[in-house]
Amino acid sequence: MNARAPALPPAVAEAREQLRDFWRARAPRERLIVGVAGGALVLLLVWWIFIAPAWQTLRETPAQLDSLDAQLQQLQRLAAETQTLKGAAPVTAAQAGLALKAASDRLGDKGKLTLLGDRATLTLNGAGTEALRSWLQEARSAARVRPVEAQLTRGTQGYNGTIVVSLGSGGAP
């Protein structure tokens, strides 16, 4: 033993000696096979622990960055729209009602608007995605209404259900 090496506990030293004896008793061909198998096992463990997770991260990162960029752009658009709406002149409940009526007329028989006090209810029957999106955008920008309740289901013909909005009394959107 090396004089500089720390002393091993007796049980470990004995196991080490038995392993050395076992190794010396093997033929060179067996040593080669065990060495190659051990090396392959070490390489496999290194792959699973260190390389594979990093490789997967590198593969997934571009898609995640694209998704995050799209979300950022959408948030920036919404922030710009919010600033525009904050700076716009207030809309009275009567003006909001007229704007909603005009937007609802574009839905045709797919939507029916009911005005009651400071609330408006849009009942949808098979409205398409683009038509509903257009109505919601116009309701937000032209009428400056806030959604209060929505109960929508999507069927084969389009969206069915109701959307209840609150008509502002000249306040902020």
Image (cartoon, helix red, strand yellow):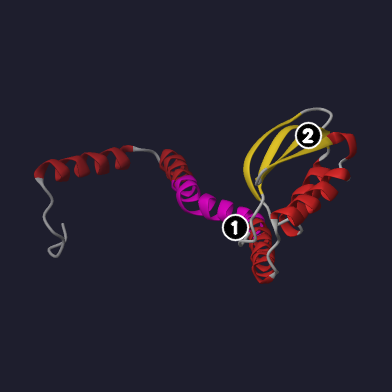
Q: How many marks?
A: 2
Task: Pick the quarter of the image with the N terminus.
Answer: bottom left
Q: Which residue is at 19% across, 40% downward?
A: 15
Q: Secondary structure at mark 1?
A: helix
Mark 2 is surrounded, within 10 Å at the Cα level, by few (under 14), some (14 to 19) or many (20 or more) other residues, namely many
Q: Which residue is at 45% across, 46% downward?
A: 45
Q: Position of residue 53 (x, y in %)?
A: 51, 51
Mark 1 is surrounded, within 10 Å at the Cα level, by few (under 14), some (14 to 19) or many (20 or more) other residues, namely few
Q: Nearer the viewer, residue 53 or 151?
A: 151
Would residue 67 appear left or right of 100 to someone viewing this image?
left
Q: Secondary structure at mark 2?
A: strand
* Image depth: mark 2 or mark 1 in front: 2
Whether residue 137 is visible to the viewer of this picture, yes or no, is no
Give, as a single range, the part of the protein colored magenta: 42-65
Please name the predominant secondary structure of the magenta segment in the image. Answer: helix
Q: Which mark is residue 124?
A: 2
Q: Amino acid at mark 1?
A: Leu
**Residue under label 1:** 58
Q: Position of residue 163 (x, y in %)?
A: 69, 39
Which of the marked residues, 2 or 1, is nearer the chain's N terminus? 1
